[in-house]
Amino acid sequence: MKEMPKLKIGKYESRYPVIQAGMGVRVGNAALTAAAIECGGMGVISSVGLGEDFHRSLKDYEIESEKNLSKEIRKARELTGGKGPLGVNIMVVLTNYESMIKTAVNEGIDFIISGAGLPLRLPEFAKDRVALVPVVSSARALELIVRTWQRKYKKAPDAAIIEGPLCGGHLAFTNEQLDNPKEYSLEILYRETKDVLDRYSLGGVPLIAAGAISVPEDVLKAIEWGYQGVQIGTRFICTEESGMSEEGKKLYVSSGSNDTVTISSPVGMPVRVIKSPLVERVLSGKKEPFACPYKCLRSCDKNKVLFCIARALLYAWKGNIDKGLFMTGYDLSRVNDIIPIKKFFDDLDKLARAESSSHQENRP
């Protein structure tokens, strides 16, 4: 590698080709997002579960969600002195998907990342005022988005995040595909999704790798494959700035890859998580007693699912290991300490400089 490339999404550019994943509930908050931006990356606020007042959220989920998304965006801007690039992650399966997008746009967000479903109507709600980044796990999904956006909105993605089967959180793969991750590796997915962009004359749209990117070497490897950047989740959960509880962070760093498992999420997709007591109960088929306080997910049938994912993620945020759900990437064995996020970027910078120096010395 000659030098560390910058990442450009629309008119927004970061010094390092790294996006901090928008992780809910309250993990990807203003503090983590601002720290990522200050370090030279792109910061992303998760739009899920931001309500500060539990009782008001029960009665006015949508109003509380919109109000606190605005608050987090403003707080991140304040912490960074107005710097960016600042984005939000808004899942397609949210019942208040449209209103959350409009709230983010009205707050002057720089870009919107959207997955957990196909964001086919995203340009309609965003009105060309922000950069739009769909999340996909296949060339087929990317082509459907590209074709739909061009036909209905005369709009192309400003970038696309390509999630591989080793990603954390919700996964757009079947269980059979997850059992054969090498067949759907990020390297293979890059070639297939790049081919889609080339066929639609969109070769300049950045592709961003996500999944099992835990150390600076992984960033350089993804760049060598052809990606213009990476998205990092699990490694950044275990930073001093993340919103995860200290008890939760300790669970992550004390766990390994063999401590992860995929279960069926109320969202209707497989989700990779740490084997917590809650997960063990779910795997045994035991239903967790709960009411449906939020009605936050369109695809969730409270009468059929075994647990409330919103409550489980809130328990994780609070540090309740027994009742919490801890989403994770597969490559947990290489995340074994809690660091300031700046350390990751400093290590990446050192590695890139070393690689560049080695390249210079090896020139003929």
Image (cartoon, rainbow, N blue to C red):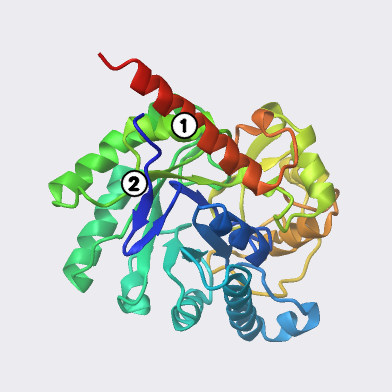
What residue do we see at 27% from left, 34% from top? 191
What residue do we see at 24% from left, 58% from top? 146
Picture layout, residue 240 above or below residue 290:
above
Quarter containing the N terminus: top left
Does the image show residue 212?
A: no
Tell me the distance, in whole angstroms, between the alpha carbons under discs 2 and 1: 23 Å
What residue do we see at 26% from left, 52% from top? 205
Q: Mark 2 belongs to which amino acid? A: Leu
What residue do we see at 44% from left, 62% from top? 114
Quarter containing the C terminus: top left
Q: Nearer the viewer, residue 19 or 341?
A: 341
Picture layout, residue 222 above or below residue 199:
above
Q: Is residue 264 left or right of residue 150?
A: right
Picture layout, residue 73 above or below residue 249:
below
Mark carried by residue 353: 1
Does the image show residue 156?
A: yes
Q: Mark 1 belongs to which amino acid? A: Arg
Q: Which residue bears the numbered disc 2?
A: 207
Q: What number of labels is visible?
A: 2
Where residue 263 appears, as percent x and y from the top left, is 63, 43
User: Could you tell me which secondary element the residue under label 2 belongs to?
Assistant: strand
Mark carried by residue 226: none
